[in-house]
Amino acid sequence: MLDRNITRPADLPSTNESDLQLAMEQNLAEHACHLHRNLESASITETGDLLIADSGLANEISNIVAAARFTPNTAPAGAAETGPELGRDRPPFSWCLGPASTPGHLAECLEAVGLEASETETGMWSGLRDPLPDAHVDDLGIHSATAPEQLADYATVLTANWNPPAT
């Protein structure tokens, strides 16, 4: 079954550029931790200025820091406290910076504590004020993974998104 939440046009967020950038980062942060909320081995730490999704797995695509909201004064200390701590006796992680991450010099703060930029991703958005098209795909079934083998199948599909495939 596919759930569709219907939102009236008046309830849709603004489409100004800064609101869209913030919405994209919030979407990334939630995407980073959506599976973690139901895994016993996982943890999610949300502070006023950061989200840390730790899967407990040795894979940087499953362990993400996102939604950075430091001030210019707190960014150096936040990077110095968080970056090295996550690198110590823990699985690898990715720190995702987006156009709404603050402050603007956060990348330099992260580089100063030894973190390196590894890749760039492009975000997309589409206006949703007009009615959505009917979504229909013949023979599509969406099922929850209820057995370890099914979760392993899902992981196999995800790991193929990287070259070389993620471990």
Image (spheres, rainbow, N blue to C red):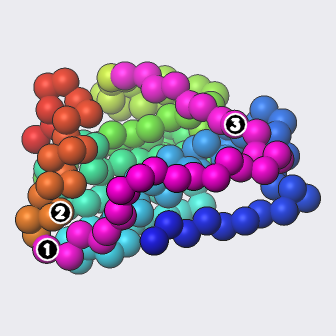
What range is drawn magenta here? 119-147
| Nearer to the camera, 86 or 122 | 122
Residue type highlighted by circle 3: Ser
Residue type highlighted by circle 1: Ala
Q: Name the residue rendered at 27%, 50% in the picture.
A: 62
Tell me the number on the disc at residue 126.
3
Q: Is there a contact, CB below 8 Å, between mark 1 and mark 2? A: yes
Q: Could you classify mark 1 by the number of other residues whose Cα lies within 10 Å: few (under 14), some (14-19), or many (20 or more)?
A: few
Between the C-alphas of marks 1 and 2, the distance is 7 Å
Question: Is 83 displayed left or right of 8 in the figure?
Answer: left
Question: Is 100 displayed left or right of 13 in the figure?
Answer: left
Q: Secondary structure at mark 1?
A: loop
Q: Name the residue rendered at 13%, 74% in the picture.
A: 147
* Looking at the image, residue 58 lies above or below residue 99: below
Residue 162: which quarter of the image?
Answer: top left
Q: Give coordinates of residue 57: x percent, y percent.
A: 16, 56
Look at the magenta stretch and give its main secondary structure.
loop
Q: Name the residue rendered at 31%, 68% in the picture.
A: 143
Q: Secondary structure at mark 2?
A: helix
* Looking at the image, residue 2 lies above or below residue 138: below
Residue 103: which quarter of the image?
Answer: top right
Q: Is there a contact, CB below 8 Å, between mark 2 and mark 3? A: no
| Nearer to the camera, 136 or 74 | 136
Tell me the number on the disc at residue 147.
1
Q: Secondary structure at mark 3?
A: loop
Q: Is there a contact, CB below 8 Å, between mark 3 and mark 1? A: no
Q: Which residue is mark 2?
A: 151
Q: Name the residue rendered at 45%, 50% in the picture.
A: 137
